[in-house]
Amino acid sequence: MNTNSQSSQTLEQAVAGRDLPRLFQHWRQQCPDKTFLIWAAFEGEDKQWSYEDFCQQGGRLAQGLADKGIKPGDSVVIHLENCPEFLFSWYACALLGVVAVTTNTRSVAADMDYFIEKTSAKAIISQASLIDSLPKDAPSLEFIACTDNVDNDQLLAFDELIADQELPLNAQPQTHENLSIQFTSGTTSRPKAVLWTHANAIWGAQTNARNFALHHDDVCQAFLPLFHTNNQSYSLLGSLWVGGTYILQPRFSKTHFWRPALQYKASWASMIPFCIKALMEEAVPEHHFRFWTPAVALPSIEEHFKVKTFGLYGMTETITQAITGDLNHPGPEMCIGRPCHGYEISVRNEHGDPVKAGETGDLFIRGIAGINLFKEYLGDPEATAKSFVDGWFETGDRITLDDAGNYFFADRAKDMLKVGGENVAASEVEAVIMASGLVDEVAVVGKPHDMLDEVPAAFIIRSPLLGTELSDQELIKKLQQHQLSQLADFKQAREFHIVEELPRSLLNKVAKKELREKLLSV
């Protein structure tokens, strides 16, 4: 038996006989009265659900969806900001055998049309503030449910989906059945639908708990978007594996961060650098945090906050961290850790050879599809196949190794931007700007930003068809308006620079490195 076969067998044994509903039911039986979910809203009183209460409510919602004709194998879009209804819907879909499609709430109508068409969604669960971005006549849709009380006959009230009885647990584990879809930006103009199985969720749950050394008494404070892997996998699934308590907030807010942290004795939180920068402006009270995971080790801030940090690296496609630090061995400043248990890691130079200490190379990850790697890009076998090189997943990211064997994130080999924790494909922004018909050519690059890491900036060449009809200022205004209906706000170019030509490499590709350098002097 070769090494890869042995790995496959070991990973299969780790998830065998398990699925997401059974993980919930395990803790429902073991500690029914223990608090699982605390909803710490910014206004009004907090709400709490025990494992028993949560599973009851989620089970009744699952039965309600079934009563409305939603069947195992169907897809349901959960288009909600952080809220308890998101979690009930997510669990209900898993119990029913339905694929939960969790979508970015900053998506515009064109995005939602695409998501629904791509997944053939039968229903949408959303909220009043987001209804305008939803299609009204998608052929596959049977209903749209709204969590708020609205006067609209075309919407189903979320409460009407709650049945009197719970849907019973499936007699057989759904281990390798489809569980969920998240859309991730790629280097093409359309996001890719990353498909997870129940086995993926089980793997993510136990791996997060192991990497973070979580235990039953841990209390996680979560505020990053639930539609995203970071909160769904790192925070939620990690907490669920150990039967911990999970505090959910609407979003990150420096003014609302410390109150629930202190009240419920939060012991850990998944962060992004933006959050830490914002909290630096606030007084630091005595707290119970054992650690934060801000993606990189930040020993420089640990004394200020009196908390340990360590780095990590993961993607939607890897379910959880493929590279991780350790509380006991966090590594130096900005370190992301070392290869994680269960994954094979390869960092290669341009010739395909392993890099040496001090060198930077392309990151490849090998695992088992449907367990510790995503199952596929839904409906796109070509994109799925192209994302692998000889069985290794090509991440599109570049990593530097130091003399001690620590890993550091270098940059993105693919043309991707990181905007406040969100991945943005430059090509998607470029395609929208080109579709305006106002430019002859465009190149989008990331401009450094104090709080958001970077923001999109566009270099454009005016369309020769415009002549002198529009001034530069009028052209930019029209492009800004064009973006509004086509791109989520975080994807929109923050500034436009009109140029006569774009710098080129020897292969006639746009030299984006030169454009980034030019931005620094603007």
Image: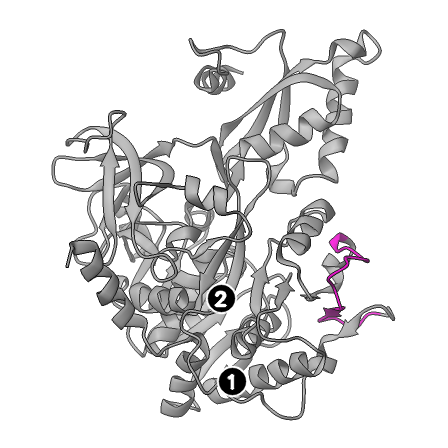
Question: Relative to residue 317, is residue 97 drawn left or right?
Answer: right
Classify residue 391 by image quadrant.
top left
Q: Which residue is mark 2?
A: 178
The span shown in magenta is: 133-150
Q: Which residue is mark 1?
A: 55
Residue 70 percent location from the top left of the image:
66, 75
Q: Amino acid at mark 2?
A: Asn
Secondary element at image label 2: strand
Q: Nearer the viewer, mark 2 or mark 1?
A: 2
Residue 371 percent location from the top left of the image:
35, 62
Residue 12 percent location from the top left of the image:
28, 68
- Look at the image and tell me whether residue 292 can be seen: yes
Contact check, label 2 and label 1, Cβ < 8 Å: no
Quadrant holding the C terminus: top right
Residue 504 percent location from the top left of the image:
49, 10
Marks 2/1: CA–CA distance:
20 Å
Q: Is residue 8 above or below residue 422?
A: below
